[in-house]
Amino acid sequence: MSDPLPSFDDTRDFADADRGFVAALAPGVVEAADGRVIWDNDAYRFLDAECPDTAHPGLWRQGRLAARQGLYEVTEGVYQVRGLDISNMTIVEGERGVIVIDPLISTETAAAALALYKEHRGDRPVTGLIYTHSHGDHFGGARGVLPHGTEQGVPVIAPAGFLEHAVSENVYAGGAMGRRAGYMYGVMLPKAPEGQIGVGLGQATSTGTFSLVPPTVDITRTGQEETVDGVRIVFQLTPGTEAPAEMNFLFPDHRALCLAENATHTLHNVLTLRGALVRDARIWARYLDEAIEYFHGRYDVAFASHHWPTWGHDDVVRFLSEQRDVYAYLHDQTLRMLNEGLTGTEIAEALRLPPALEKAWHARGYYGSLSHNAKAVYQRYLGWFDGNPAHLWEHPPVELARRYVDVAGGPVEAIAKARKYADAGDLRFAATLLNHVVFADPDDREARDALAEVYTRLGHGAENATWRNFYLTGAKELRDGPRAEIVDLASPEMLMALTVPMLLDSLAIRIDGPRAWADDLTIDLVVTEPQDERARHRLTLHHGALTHRETAGPRTPPGLVLTLTKERLLGVLAGRGLDGVESEGDPALLDRLFSYLTKPDPNFPIVTP
């Protein structure tokens, strides 16, 4: 985090970020139907000032670039709306209408972005929709550009596996991810020089209505070509890079290359701090290398789903080569040191980029970081255990904290020692020691305030936006308690996109196992609609585990059989009863099953036990 910064005299990014500007949305605010503000880009006007002591100068620079808002021309017939969500919406003009790429997070911001385009380019219908990959900020606003009843005949294109990954990420660990995302994006922080100044990849996430229009065209191979509304598109499939399902693609007649989120103006995450499956930095680098070769000579500009474009073929090659080398170097050097016996924490401390990459602004860690990415690569190959037996069976946080505080001489002495470390500039150990005091006694107000102050100082000095937001949100919750507003991603369309097995998985992970240890029940679900999901599913609760499988016919009779459509199943799982459901057997079994379900706390504690 303390590598020397590139030269501030290099202003090419500012020229590129402003190039092609057409008009801004004024005011830069988007509201929901009930008047609630779900996006406010004007709140970042403070970034026009000089960098204060409460921010890292590199991150301040990144915020100034990412906060630019409006409609921009990328090249003839290709436009972007930037600054109306964390992601960009790209619009490609066809023969009859427009192709929309990545319709942001919320229907409201997507509709506002499309309206801004139409205001300056004319009222053209949406004739195609493309999702670059399976993360919610690239499809959640779909109904803002394709309202219900307008999707007929409009191709919706996505990489193979998109739907499964798009919905599963928000189901299995969605509660914990949502809570941690509040920290990562600084949702509860004020937008101010001392608070949230962006997230490195953009400024913030909108908080409006989440939606999903399922894909109708799958991209299954590199080299696949599609023509949409007269526009030719050549695809490169890049699974397992920044997302499990992702793709780059070329508009050969526009000489414009879309890089999805595989190459942006920051070092990205190998493992995002909100939590996710660890990404493969090796594959990521290889697909960037493939893109350099596969699309060579066929473009004059490259744009992505975040940040600003890069113009000039040679400049794009340089950009892609440096992005490739960052992920390859990160992967290979972590493996080299791992095989020399270093642990993930030790590798993160020792690893630094080559000087030529350190001088590249787009390789800086504003969203991902070299430190937590190295730990992620270690985790991918060796997991959580570093091989030291002392770490094999440590006490859980509260019990460990009480013992640390006892060793330090009690809470008063521990706080005093922590303050000495903080005064000496060792904020990292001060945070560690004070965290133990807080976990040993979360009601110790002095310890909470002291830790909040250390977190604030760490946040203000962080170059990485997500680290800053974690530190400052932790400080806020230590002072005020958790009051996070969790965005509900479980829209009806998202739930309908879940397969029946995925819905049943979501039920299984909510079973309170110990309470269900002694129970034994079997329920069959016969799903009659839609056609592609017609099947009989057997649910078995045994030894506290809810398992399920498709079955051609019952080898042993169940206690209850429910015959219903998938839509009715969603209603049953939501607790709306068995109206309209054909039932045979004992309906009390369903109540018994539901009695074991837990409801996760969306505001579970993070900086306190």
Image (cartoon, rainbow, N blue to C red):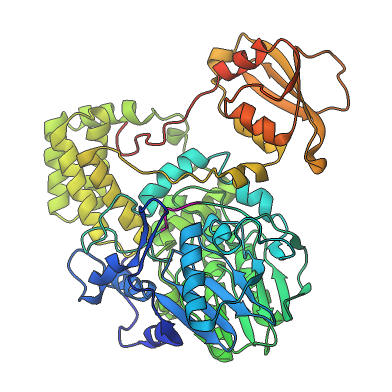
- Compared with residue 552, is residue 32 higher up or lower down, i.e. above or below? below
Instruction: Point out residue 229 in the picture as x, y percentages from the top left corner.
Output: 72, 77
Look at 70% across and 40% down and name the residue there: 499
Q: Can residue 181 be seen in this view?
A: yes
Span shown in magenta? 205-209
Q: How many marks?
A: 0
Indicate the quadrant containing the N terminus: top left, top right, bottom left or bottom right. bottom left
Answer left or right for 350 relative to 290. left
Look at 45% across and 49% down and name the residue there: 274
Q: Does the magenta stretch include residue 203?
A: no
Q: Is residue 387 visible?
A: no
600 and 608: which is toward the camera = 600
Specify the quadrant of the image occupied by residue 570: top right
Specify the quadrant of the image occupied by residue 448: top left
578 and 89: which is toward the camera = 578
Indicate the quadrant containing the C terminus: top left, top right, bottom left or bottom right. top left
15 and 91: which is toward the camera = 91
Instruction: Point out residue 46 in the picture as x, y percentages from the top left corner.
Output: 23, 70
- Compared with residue 252, is residue 512 higher up or lower down, i.e. above or below? above
- Compared with residue 523, is residue 77 higher up or lower down, i.e. above or below? below
78 and 472: which is toward the camera = 78
Look at 26% across and 67% down and name the residue there: 56
Answer left or right for 522 relative to 543. right
Instruction: Point out residue 295 in the picture as x, y percentages from the top left corner.
Output: 69, 82
Q: Is the magenta stretch mostly helix, strand or loop?
A: loop
- Compared with residue 539, is residue 94 higher up or lower down, i.e. above or below? below
Answer left or right for 374 relative to 9. right
Instruction: Point out residue 283 in the picture as x, y percentages from the top left corner.
Output: 64, 63
